[in-house]
Image (tube, rainbow, N blue to C red):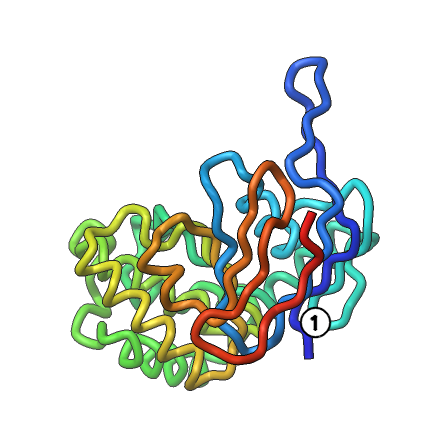
Amino acid sequence: MNAVELSHVSKHYLLGAERVAAISDVTLRIRAQRFTVLAGPSGSGKSTLLNLIGCIDRPDAGHLLIGGKTVQDWTDADLTAFRASHIGFIFQNFNLLPVLTAWENVEYPLLLAGTPATERRRRVSEMLDAVGLADKARHRPNQLSGGQCQRVAIARALIHQPQLILADEPTANLDSQTATGIVSLMRDLQKQRHTTFVFSSHDPMLMSHADDLVQIRDGRIGLVAPTMASEPATGTPQ
């Protein structure tokens, strides 16, 4: 089963009066319950591709399916609701709310979803324990290390049990030892919870942990290949 399918997808942006292609005619299938890395240098189009998969941007051309649903023609309200229930996001700058504790940051998506208090307490406690931060629940982000902040962000992304987790350069602001620990944590959680993880990165360490590696350059797919696993994602080299 494919978690994500793109067929001849393109996205352009205006740079002054010039229309610039961020990605061009991309066809790609990302298999469910795998650890896939979109790899490429800065400006290659990997973040644009991640934003399209995350229903943050819309393609200018082509077809985009997330979880078997054709999403590119949905209303903004429909896309917002879909993101809230089906997709979790992890950012390189963590994007935690500084006035909230670790517990409150993880709980926040459940509050937005109207989850009952008893269920919120159970799930937040379980997630903080899963990421090794049960003893830091009452700490605010400025009282945590970078690695601990990223663990809070991972817990927040997983708290509503999404089918798909998207991570934009999640190790970029971490030292190598901390980054290795964060990647191992995400790998373990992905296996335990049968969730699809898709990353954008140019970190060789993160790439080495991928099931499938998608090389992107100049807005086009150059290579789609399995790394540790036997079944590849499938794509059309451009």
Q: Residue at x 65, y 71 (%)?
A: 3
Q: Quadrant of residue 208?
A: bottom left
Residue at image mark 1: 67
* Nearest to the observer: residue 200 or residue 205: 205
Image quadrant occupied by the N terminus: bottom right
Q: Is residue 164 left or right of residue 78?
A: left
* Nearest to the observer: residue 180 or residue 87: 180
Q: Position of residue 161 (x, y in %)?
A: 52, 77
Q: Residue at x 32, y 53 (%)?
A: 171
Three-letter amino acid code at the position of disc 1: Gly
Q: Residue at x 67, y 45 (%)?
A: 57
Q: Position of residue 38 (x, y in %)?
A: 52, 54
Q: Is residue 90 visible?
A: yes
Q: Position of residue 109 (x, y in %)?
A: 49, 65
* Nearest to the observer: residue 218 or residue 189: 218
Q: Residue at x 23, y 61 (%)?
A: 148
82 over 229 or under it: above or below: above
Q: Is residue 157 left or right of residue 76?
A: left
Q: Is residue 175 left or right of residue 199?
A: left
Q: Alpha-carbon neighbours of circle 1 within 10 Å: few (<14), some, or many (≥20)?
A: some
111 over 54 or under it: above or below: below
